[in-house]
Amino acid sequence: MSEQAGEPVQLKVVVADDQAAVREPLAAVLGLAEDIDVVASAADGTEVLAAVAAGPVDVVLMDLRMPVMDGIEATRRLSEEHPEVAVVVLTTFADDESILGALGAGARGYLTKNAGRQDITRAIRAAGAGQSVLDREVQDRLLATARAQAPATEQAARQPLPDDLTPREREVLALIGQGLSNRGIAETLFISEATVKTHINNLFAKAHIRDRADAVRRAIGAGLS
């Protein structure tokens, strides 16, 4: 993020979608937000990489199905070459292959195109602050996938949790296992999202949890969900 004297902090955003009828109105709407500056739009992954190279860019709002270079490959390249740039996926696809592919490539957020403008701007702001946002449909898919995989990986799923997890960290893990987002966990426990993020970072480090899907498996295996 950049800041000039007397002006609010603005997130520099690139909007990527191969359909101009989607890309251009979305860029215009996002540009109305005081703290978002749409610095470029892109019709494919190669254009995304070029826009980021020209920089500065904080967040890319990324479609997945694009010609020349798709969104997953572009996300992977950004993660390797520009790890400081956050990617939020915005797509019509919510299948396991798309979700796991994008998150595995390094996307920090994943929304379907059913998301409203407020949901999208909130996800961009969260990504710019180093947080992850997954919409409910995506959370449900991850939860279902993790539950389906748990019996096949019984030994891993039953890996005991470390003794030094605090009661609050166990509560947070249990709620992740139920499919709640950071915001949902914060509302359930009456704490801030920043505090939730701290607990998640701590428990992931202590329990050697790789990602949210892994956290769901561990919660199920430990009998927390």
Image: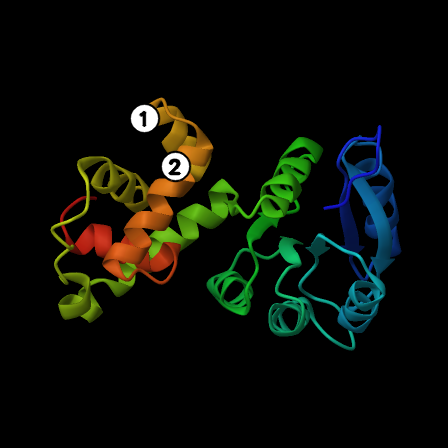
Residue ranking furthest to the front: 5
Where does the image place residue 209, in percent across and percent down from the top left?
31, 60
As rendered, which of 95 and 110 lies closer to the eye?
Answer: 110
Asked whether, in this view, residue 23 is left or right of residue 207, the answer is: right
Does residue 150 appear in this view?
yes
Quarter of the C terminus within the rendering: top left
Q: Where in the figure is residue 156, as x and y percent of width and height?
A: 19, 68
Q: In this view, does 65 lie above or below 178?
A: below
Q: Could you tell me which secondary element the residue under label 2 belongs to?
A: helix
Q: Which picture quadrant has residue 30?
A: top right
Task: Pick out the residue farthest to the bottom.
Answer: 68
Q: How many labels does the image show?
A: 2
Name the residue at 86% across, 55% down: 40
Q: What residue type is labelled 1?
A: Leu
The mark that comes first in sequence, 2 or 1, is: 1
Pointers 2 and 1 in contact (C-beta within 8 Å): yes
In the figure, is residue 111 to the left or right of 203?
right
Comparing 85 with 29, the one in front is 85
Which residue type carries mark 2? Val
Please state which of the two labelled residues, at mark 2 or mark 1, is closer to the viewer: 2
Query: Could you tell me which residue is drawn at 63 percent across and 56 percent down?
Result: 86
> Badge 2 local density, few (<14 within 10 Å), some, or many (20+)?
many
**Left or right, residue 96 beside residue 157:** right
Q: Residue 196 carries which label?
A: 2
Q: Name the residue under label 1.
A: 189
